[in-house]
Image (spheres, helix red, strand yellow):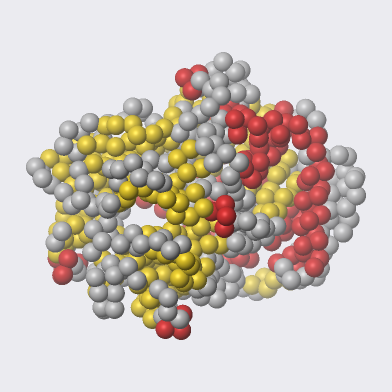
Amino acid sequence: MDFTNHSSPTAPRRDYTRSVHGKSTSDPWFWLRHREDPAVLEYLRAENEWTDHSTEHLADLREHLFDEIKSRVQEEDQSVPIPKGDWEYRVRTGQGLQYPVHVRQRRGKTATEEVLLDENDLATGVDYFAVGDLSISPDHRLLAYTVDTEGNEEYELTVLDLETREVIDSGIGGLSYGLVWANDSSTLFMVLTDEARRPDRVIRHEVGSKQTLDATVFTETDERFWVGVGATRSERFVVIGSESKMSSEYWLLDADSPKSDLSLVEPRREGHEYRISHQGSRLLILTNDNAVDFRLMEAPVHDAGYANWKELIPYREGVRLEDVDVFETFTVVTERRQGVPIMRVLDHEDASEFEIEMAEPIFEAGPGANAEYSTRTFRYGYTSMVTPPSTYEIDIDTRQQLLLKQQAVLGDTDLSVYRSERSWSTSDDGTKVPISLVWRPSSVTFPAPTVIYGYGAYEIGIPASFSSARLSLLDRGVVFAIAHVRGGGELGRNWYEQGRLEHKQNTFSDFGSCRDHLVNEGWADPQHIVARGGSAGGLLMGVMVNQRPDAFTGVVAEVPFVDNVNTMLDPTIPLTVTEYEEWGNPNDPETFQMMSAYGPYENVTSVDHPALLVTAGLNDPRVQYWEPAKWVAKLRSETTSTQPILLRTEIDSGHGGPSGRYDAWREEAFVLSVILEMLTLATPLSPTRDSRES
């Protein structure tokens, strides 16, 4: 490896040619995917050292930012108690503790707090720690939880007797998300993964029995689909779902009879998505059948096939039905209108309905932790770009709202000094694209240094929500913007459809139009704009670096999906087959051409690139570490710029970065310090080096 105090690492070239559809393409950094090759880890560590070396002059700023982030957090804190049966459950955090502590108390009494699980104890001696699922048995006697200590999102089961504190079951590994008790408090349903880490099976496990005795109750053989398991709030059914990106199918199992047969709700058909909830003698069904933005149906529990579906809420153009929360005597429907969530309460006791009133015009809200089925109160979460996450409870009878808790922002922070606004850009095809903005008027001078964030995939809407860490940017005169580009779900299903497959270029054009709008309207200083995005948003960053290299001072691409064509050509990589409906299958010649036209790794050219900070996770199952590593190597070989291209790989974690909260704050402080350096360009991020290092 070429690594000195005066030059960045150079990943050696090794001959490799990809031959697809009669076209041969050289890929000299293909070897970086061979994680068992000692040279791979050597190279990644050298890149980490170079990044540390290149940013060592930011150490004081980094530490100051960390102190700012930490100082705003109430380290000794606890969640709002969640009532369930005779108990109230909550989560505590403690000063100096990386991980939460799960506790409970007897309901309505001044009983002693009981610690259920202290994640800090379990995390002792490991570099990464994450709880996947945590579930209390219906009799409140047993605690089942799953743990990942690698960052690869594969979990292992432990079952704890809360009376004796004895571990009565452990060791089942290879688990995905999903952990559900049957009503006998001794049977668990869990999800296992196949060799490609696709969740493909639901097993039934008797607590304390040998794993060899587990029964497979459902197997999904179609590689486009992945499996999940859950339970209805009524505790009447265990629900098994199998979903692709565009189709779904659900099965019910009697929670009182865990060995009973599954009952199919409605067979899958291509392009049909539905979700189910149980309420009394009926199922409520959210479906896109003849409704691009979904409609709500009902059907009898014991004869729930499509022939018996009856419409309750019709499809309305421009109104996306996102969620249905079902209780014994009322239902809450979450709709999204013009990018804003609206929660409608349907009260079945008097056949009335009303919308929950919100305080601001632009906000994010959604159902909170509502564990009980028989209740006349509903909890929901609320936030905006200037309002910290808040938990509210509304009385269905009186419609009175009560603020139960708002995330504290400590120090001398005065949230009233910040402002937020919604603006709209016009994309290349005339489409109006929303932008959420937040800034501190007393600190900003327009046109201002600006950070613009984007994602644009999977119908995921980026919420206009609060960030305490972001205040460190705003206090320094930076404007922060979220570009709600197509491919996301902010403006309904069509907004998503217009940003995927053959329409993917719209995502990139939208982001560029948002950048230009902010410049043209006087928000952003064109010489001081940083773009940031992660995962699928990292693909967006990669395309921007290729298509608009002069539009940004710097780009932060976190765990970026930048080698999309090569990844999607390989069905052995986790998520590949299940992602065909999102990105396309490049084994088809036309799709290959379409994806290759924008693929970040495919389209690196010799231009002046902006400063880049790229991150990766060695154990990341979603975006393999070699994608950002290969991209950085290729960028370095082609760039005509002297701006730094930095790669930082988390050796002990995966897609989400460090697992402990203090470690996560330090990581964010590092990223913010680099962003501020990119925006000011007061001193170079990197010492003098050659501009081409191939």
Horizontal relation, residue 681 to residue 77: left or right: right
Residue 312, horizontal then vertical, whole percent: 16, 52
Q: Can you say which quadrant of the picture contains the N terminus?
A: bottom right
Residue 24, horizontal then vertical, whole percent: 70, 70
Residue placed most toward the observer, 8 or 343: 343
Residue placed most toward the observer, 382 or 675: 382
Horizontal relation, residue 432 to residue 231: left or right: right
Residue at (83%, 62%) from the top-left corner?
12
Numbered disc total? 0
Residue at (45%, 40%) from the top-left corner?
78
Q: Can residue 455 be seen in this view?
A: yes
Residue at (60%, 61%) from the top-left corner?
149
Q: Can residue 423 be seen in this view?
A: no
Residue at (15%, 59%) from the top-left corner?
280
Residue 655, horizontal then vertical, whole percent: 59, 55
Where on the picture, by quarter, is residue 439?
Answer: top right
